[in-house]
């Protein structure tokens, strides 16, 4: 009896799945999303007594209810997608650029700077090009500073890019104070550098830019030498160095590309949509983009779906709140949190499976390989499991 | 290739759902839309949200007839939301934040059969659109009353030897007429019962920043020795800092007595119910809405909460009633020029220094004689309207939104950078 007690296995352990059939992950994902929606419905019913069937109706109406809403949704998807495309090459390289927010803000700031200084004084088409150039330079500059530090002195890029966000916010607040001296903290929109309105709205321009940029990024990452270099640097810097890749150059070049796209986003947000700038112009999407990019496994095509999911959830829960007469934003945040937690959880279970003790004891498989499998499993998934619980808290 | 097919399939499914849902239309009933900058956790927005709900209830409108959109940024999002509400069939759309104005005007030009109303804005009287309207209230009357309560408390604390100074602190959002008008009237109210009073003002540069407001209040209490705090910003930062420090607080936008039972004295707020009733009813009946509406203490648009006897000086409630009656009767004027003095500092010539109170003229005793205020708000920041007459600064007479932005003696701005 004593010996059996000593060798007793834990209640369950995690085993890495091998040879997963290609359709299985998609089944798991679809099931998860369906389950997430069931949870949303139940939560709304418990919290506000809204009929869950109606909840789904509101969600779809909020996102797709009218042609105008559809266009707004697509435009917002396009903008979020552009944010995600901007962070993706750096992420693929395992350079944790969480400064897209600040890079976009600086792009927006540069655009507004040009509008304020030359708006009305020079030809509007010329102004658009000046704005675009200024935005790109500002965005790229904001991204390349942490990259230079990383390449030269191996500074921590996560902290650096994060801090740069706050600097960008302060730059904008300071500029607003100068531009609008009576100081209510808002800058009235200025009707200059108007991007062409395709179909009478500001929607199509952003959408087209996003489509072009997605195609570009897909090709860039998948079929070009640059893309290959990014991937190798991401996998192992030493390997990269060994095969003669200039790692510093790749880091700096990639971050310039990231910043450049952020600059374009800032330009679109100001010249294409708002014609003004504030500290909330980026609206936290620089951070949401990380989730979008990550969930899509850094694949630009999948990002279309993940950004659609994010924007759909935001618009949908917003409509549920409005229609239920709830004037507190906590619920839509909770719902979005739950859905993403479930999706991240599902990715975990696509890679790992739980094996319970009594099942293992039945002794279908010979003991030796299972033990090997077990030791492999226990080591690798542990940190990820911890991460999942940390997020839950 | 497989990925591409998956994506196309998913998009196709979404498109099908879309066509199904586009099909259903809203039933035709009278609706109004309310656009709020933050959600109800901001005291400022909560004040509008509650008023809109109360007004709707009094008019017998159902919940489904009042569509409230919260968290709408002061950007093109406001225009898009207004447009969305108009498409949903709202006959009247209201927005609550200053920065919403340009977007509301843009939407008003597009939807001429929908009434657009905007609180705290300044452009309705110059835009001259038939369907765009501004509103504000003479909140300086309420601030003045709250100031009286503050002055009484200061006098009592000094009589009891709890403190040995007559200094108040004020946490303001921006160096902006609405805030300046507010703290000046508050100060004048306190001065009317406590002539020795002085005040320090610290700005946060944000309408809602819990940390900055808390830090500002703590700085005023710890480093500046202020014996009493009031604020014009929307978070609980300042009131809760006061409760922690045991320093009396005059609040704004609504009672904070639940969170601050020992230090909350009284709060002034704008009661938007009369205005909401007016515009909802007008939109429903198709009658005219005033272009620039100023609610007053007399019509119930400016109110005080109940006095918290735990913290207030003895006899506060009775004194407030007396002063309120004088304000309602018009015998007492908040910005009576004989009650304060103004110092004019010409520009020093240094870059960015435009001097102080350069639009004013004063007599040898510092009494305000004339002041040209920037009432038209054309973006030039140059005054064009003479606003001193009958021995008082005529606040909210030429437009509803405040334009009193004089720095009077006795008030020190710790930071004017915002």
Image: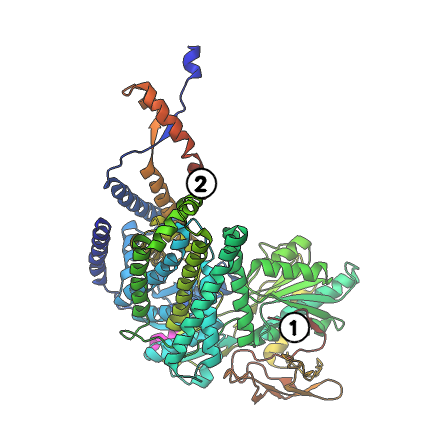
Q: Nearer the viewer, residue B321 or B17?
A: B17
The x, y position of residue B319, in whole percent, is 67, 69
Q: Nearer the viewer, residue A213 or A353?
A: A213
The x, y position of residue B215, in whole percent, is 63, 59
Q: Nearer the viewer, residue B265 or B180?
A: B180
Q: Measure how far apart labels 1 and 2 are at the Cα level.
A: 63 Å
Q: Residue at image x 27%, y 62%?
A: A65
Residue A379 against residue A163 in the figure, above or below = above
Label 1's element?
Answer: helix
Residue B16 against residue B207 in the figure, above or below = above
Instruction: Point out which mark residue A109 bears.
Output: none
A330 relative position to B239: left or right: left
Instruction: Point out which mark residue A387 bears.
Output: 2
Write down the residue under mark 1: B322
**Are the residues under badges 1 and 2 in a single subunit?**
no
Badge 2: chain ID: A
Graded by Cα atoms within 10 Å as few (under 14), some (14 to 19) or many (20 or more), the crowding at tag 2 reads few
Q: Quadrant of residue A259?
A: bottom left
Badge 1: chain ID: B
Which residue is situated farthest in the top direction here?
A1
Q: Quadrant of residue A358?
A: top left
**Which corner quadrant holds the N terminus of chain A?**
top left
A273 relative position to B29: left or right: right
| Magenta region | B280-286
């Amino acid at each position: 009896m004593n010996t059996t007690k000593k060798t007793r296995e834990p209640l369950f352990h995690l085993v890495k799945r091998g040879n997963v059939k290609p359709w299985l992950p998609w089944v798991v994902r679809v099931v998860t999303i369906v389950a997430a929606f069931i949870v949303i419905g139940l939560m709304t019913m418990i919290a506000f007594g809204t009929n869950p069937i109606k909840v789904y109706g509101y969600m779809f109406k909020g996102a797709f209810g009218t042609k105008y809403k559809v266009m707004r949704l697509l435009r917002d998807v396009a903008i979020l997608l552009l944010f995600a495309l901007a962070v993706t090459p750096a992420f693929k390289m395992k350079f944790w650029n969480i400064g897209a927010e600040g890079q976009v803000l600086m792009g927006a700031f540069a655009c507004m700077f040009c509008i304020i200084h030359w708006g009305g004084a020079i030809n509007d088409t010329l102004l658009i090009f000046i704005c675009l150039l200024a935005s790109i330079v500002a965005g790229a500059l904001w991204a390349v500073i942490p990259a230079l530090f990383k390449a030269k002195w191996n500074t921590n890029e996560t902290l650096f890019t994060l801090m740069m966000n706050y600097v960008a916010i302060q730059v904008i607040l300071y500029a607003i104070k100068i531009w609008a001296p009576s100081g209510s903290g808002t800058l009235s929109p200025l009707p200059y550098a108007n991007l062409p309105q395709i179909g009478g709205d500001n929607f199509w321009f952003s959408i087209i830019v996003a489509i072009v940029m997605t195609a570009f990024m897909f090709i860039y990452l998948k079929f070009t030498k640059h893309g290959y270099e990014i991937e190798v640097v991401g996998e192992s810097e030493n390997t990269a160095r060994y095969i003669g890749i200039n790692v510093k150059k790749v880091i700096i070049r990639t971050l310039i590309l990231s910043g450049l796209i952020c600059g374009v986003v800032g330009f679109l947000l100001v010249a294409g949509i708002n014609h003004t700038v504030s500290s909330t112009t980026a609206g936290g999407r620089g951070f949401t983009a990380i989730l979008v990019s990550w969930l899509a496994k850094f694949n630009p095509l999948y990002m279309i779906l993940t950004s659609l999911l994010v924007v759909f959830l935001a618009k949908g829960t917003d409509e549920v709140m409005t229609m239920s007469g709830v004037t507190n934003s906590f619920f839509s945040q909770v719902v979005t949190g739950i859905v993403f937690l479930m999706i991240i959880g599902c990715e975990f279970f696509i890679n790992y499976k739980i094996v319970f003790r009594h099942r293992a004891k039945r002794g279908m498989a010979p003991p030796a390989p299972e033990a090997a499998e077990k030791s492999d499993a226990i080591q690798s998934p542990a940190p990820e499991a911890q991460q999942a619980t940390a997020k839950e808290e | 290739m497989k990925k591409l097919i998956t994506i196309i399939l998913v998009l196709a499914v979404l498109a099908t759902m879309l066509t199904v849902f586009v099909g259903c239309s809203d039933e035709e009933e009278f609706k109004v839309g309310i656009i709020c900058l933050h959600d109800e956790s901001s005291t400022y927005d909560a004040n509008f949200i509650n008023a809109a709900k109360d007004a709707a209830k009094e008019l017998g409108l159902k919940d489904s007839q009042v569509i409230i959109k919260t968290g709408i940024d002061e950007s093109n999002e406001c225009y898009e939301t207004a447009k969305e509400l108009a498409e949903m069939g709202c006959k009247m759309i209201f927005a609550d934040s200053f920065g919403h104005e340009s977007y509301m005007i843009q939407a008003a030009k597009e939807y001429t059969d929908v009434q657009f109303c905007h609180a705290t804005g300044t452009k309705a009287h110059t835009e001259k659109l038939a369907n765009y309207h501004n509103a504000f209230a003479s909140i300086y009357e309420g601030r003045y009353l709250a100031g009286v309560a503050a002055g009484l408390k200061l006098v009592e604390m000094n009589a009891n030897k709890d403190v040995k100074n007559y200094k108040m602190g004020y946490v303001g959002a921006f160096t902006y007429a609405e805030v300046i008008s507010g703290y000046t009237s508050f100060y004048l109210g306190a001065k009317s019962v406590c002539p020795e009073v002085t005040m320090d003002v610290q700005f946060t540069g944000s309408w809602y920043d819990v940390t900055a407001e808390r830090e500002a209040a703590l700085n005023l209490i710890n480093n500046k020795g202020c014996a009493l705090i009031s604020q014009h910003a929307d978070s609980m930062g300042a009131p809760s800092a006061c409760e922690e420090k045991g320093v009396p607080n005059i609040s704004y936008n609504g009672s904070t007595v639940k969170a601050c039972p020992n230090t909350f004295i009284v709060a002034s707020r704008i009661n938007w119910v009369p205005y909401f009733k007016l515009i909802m009813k007008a939109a429903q009946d198709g009658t005219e809405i005033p272009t620039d509406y100023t609610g007053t203490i007399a019509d119930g648009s400016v109110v005080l909460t109940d006095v918290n006897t735990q913290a207030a000086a003895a006899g506060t409630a009775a004194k407030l009633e007396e002063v309120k009656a004088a304000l309602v009767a018009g015998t007492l004027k908040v910005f009576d020029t004989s009650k304060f003095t103004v110092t004019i500092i010409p520009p020093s010539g240094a870059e960015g220094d435009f001097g102080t109170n350069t639009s004013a003229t004063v007599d040898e005793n510092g009494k305000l004689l004339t002041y040209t205020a920037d009432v038209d708000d054309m973006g030039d920041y140059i005054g064009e309207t003479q606003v001193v007459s009958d021995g008082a600064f005529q606040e909210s007479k030429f437009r509803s939104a405040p334009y009193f932005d004089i720095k009077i003696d006795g008030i020190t701005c710790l930071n004017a950078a915002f």
